[in-house]
Amino acid sequence: MIVVFGATGNTGLHLVRDLLARGLRTRVAARDPEKARRLIGQGPEYVRADLLQPESLNAALAGAQGLYVAVGGMSGTPDLVAAESRLINVAKASGVAQYVHVSGIDAAVEGPARVQRWHAEIEVAIEKSGVPFTILRPNFFMQNFLGMAGAIRTGVLPLPAGEARASLIDARDIAHAAAVVLSEPGHLGRRYTLTGPDPISHRDVAAMLGEVMGHRVEYLNVPPPAFAQAGRDAGMPGWFAELLTDVYVQVLAAGRAERVTDDVRRLTGRPARSFATFAQDHRAAFRGP
């Protein structure tokens, strides 16, 4: 049994489908199991679990061999380290044989971005617990642009990303890599840095999105405070708007996301998808109704 926390997120949805295609028993742990069922459909088991309610975690992990945890998004919590540390303790007590944590590129306890430091603390907690683990450290997700489709349709891509390049990665490649490490031997105690095939600038991104949209899309290098305020105005929790702005400034705009690795190909046997492929695959979402 493999339990997935974050099954309705960018990577989790694809992972669940991949695991089921491999014939693996899969359980979705979600705060709203019925909402998850409507999104994912039949196939996995569903159980209610909330990181902020520790009493819900034991049932979610009952009989689990593998555990996938990707809970660092907007629907998560600003107390991520404490919340996931509780899950780590339950995983250890439940005898989970593999804990797969989705971290962030170059996570470090003294990293420049707050989210890097959070993930590094979680990695340390996993290792200290003694539970067998595999760490996935992906770069920025291409799927982040889907949340900006409304602005992109008007012809602008507003981000505080500077002029640096980044080896953006498709969440589908992260999910496929996760399915491999959860279903095949040889990955315990390993850390993998997952990137796209080449570093591109956000002006490159805007140009490729423009080709898909059929009209020009202009990249706007917006001031960080304006970006954070726009996030709050759009309904983001304030803590997440600040966290997202911080990682764009401290990692992406600072040129710390350019590195390219071959880990996706080594794990999955195929190269990571390019941004051009991602944009074409999601052209309907970008073009809208």
Image (cartoon, rainbow, N blue to C red):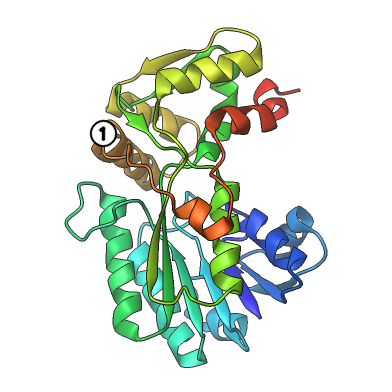
Q: Is residue 225 above or below residue 207?
A: below
> How many other residues sit within 10 Å of disc 1, few (<14), some (14-19) or many (≥20)?
some
Q: Secondary structure at mark 1?
A: loop
Question: Residue 244 falls in which quadrant of the image?
Answer: top left
At 51% across and 90% down in the image, what residue appears? 94
Visible in this render: residue 51? yes
User: As drawn, is 57 to the left or to the right of 13?
Assistant: left
Which sits in the foreground, 18 or 270? 270
The percent coordinates of residue 191 (x first, y second) are 37, 65
The percent coordinates of residue 241 (x first, y second) are 38, 40
At 55% across and 19% down in the image, what residue appears? 208
Return the residue at label 1. 255
Q: Is residue 274 above or below residue 135?
A: above
At 57% across and 57% down in the image, what residue appears? 268
Quadrant, the C terminus: top right
Quadrant, the N terminus: bottom right
Which sits in the foreground, 233 or 88? 88
Visible in this render: residue 75? no
The percent coordinates of residue 149 (x first, y second) are 59, 26
The percent coordinates of residue 132 (x first, y second) are 42, 82
